[in-house]
Amino acid sequence: MAAARIAAVFLVAFLPVVGAQQSSQTQLTIHVTDVTRAVVPGAHIEIDPSPPAIDPGLATDDQGIATASLPARTYTLSIIAPGFQKWTRQIDVQIGADRTIMATLEVEPTECNPCITVVSHPDLPLENPEPVFLPLQPFNNLTPLPSHIPKKRW
């Protein structure tokens, strides 16, 4: 009888610990960087199908990291950030196998990359004060201006 009581106390005391180890959720950590390995804070993360416990406003923090607890299944993970191409991958989440995803975002291609925007200049009368986009070109065949400062001899 005493052995049965000890066994019952043992089960009651340690059953929550065993149950906690068999969680049905997996921790997903997402690191978002650009091609230069700089972190991308504020990147919006979409998980499809969206589990009910996931915040629809899930985004990376100041370190470019976001975390979510997900049940086991296959998901489509999409990351969206201004100035970058949308990043989409299909991931498999399994119970008890915490997962880290490294997402590298590429810069959104533009028609003129890089460009200079000229809005106005006080010495230039502009008939149409609309922005003008000029591509940056290397300055070739330039000669330095003569210096009017006399060189000192030491």
Image (cartoon, rainbow, N blue to C red):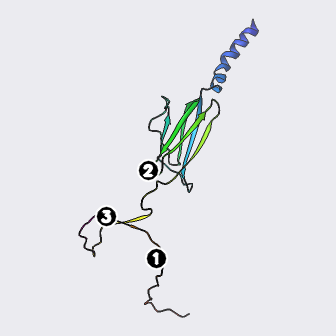
Task: Identify the image quadrant of residue 128.
Answer: bottom left
Question: Does dot 3 land on a helix, a strand or a loop?
Answer: loop
Number of the label disc, if any, that sits on residue 112 = none
Point 46% across, 84% down: residue: 144
Magenta span contains residue 129: yes
Residue type at the position of mark 3? Pro
Using the numbered discs, state the Cα–Cα distance from disc 2 to disc 3 in whole angstroms: 22 Å
Toward the front, the furthest residue is 111
Asked whether, in this view, residue 36 is left or right of residue 111, the answer is right
Compare marks 2 and 1 and give the one earlier in the sequence.
2
Q: Which residues are magenta?
A: 124-132
Question: Which residue is under mark 2?
Answer: 82
Q: Nearer the viewer, mark 2 or mark 3?
A: 3
Question: Which residue is under mark 1?
Answer: 139
Compare marks 2 and 3 and give the one earlier in the sequence.
2
Question: Which residue is under mark 3?
Answer: 131
Give the x, y percent position of residue 141.
Answer: 47, 81
Using the numbered discs, state the Cα–Cα distance from disc 3 to disc 1 in whole angstroms: 23 Å
Residue type at the position of mark 2? Pro
Question: Does dot 1 land on a helix, a strand or a loop?
Answer: loop
Compare marks 3 and 1 and give the one earlier in the sequence.
3
Q: Nearer the viewer, mark 2 or mark 1?
A: 1
Does the residue at mark 2 contact the one at mark 1 (Cβ under 8 Å)?
no
Give the x, y percent position of residue 143.
Answer: 47, 84
- Is 111 in front, or is 42? 111
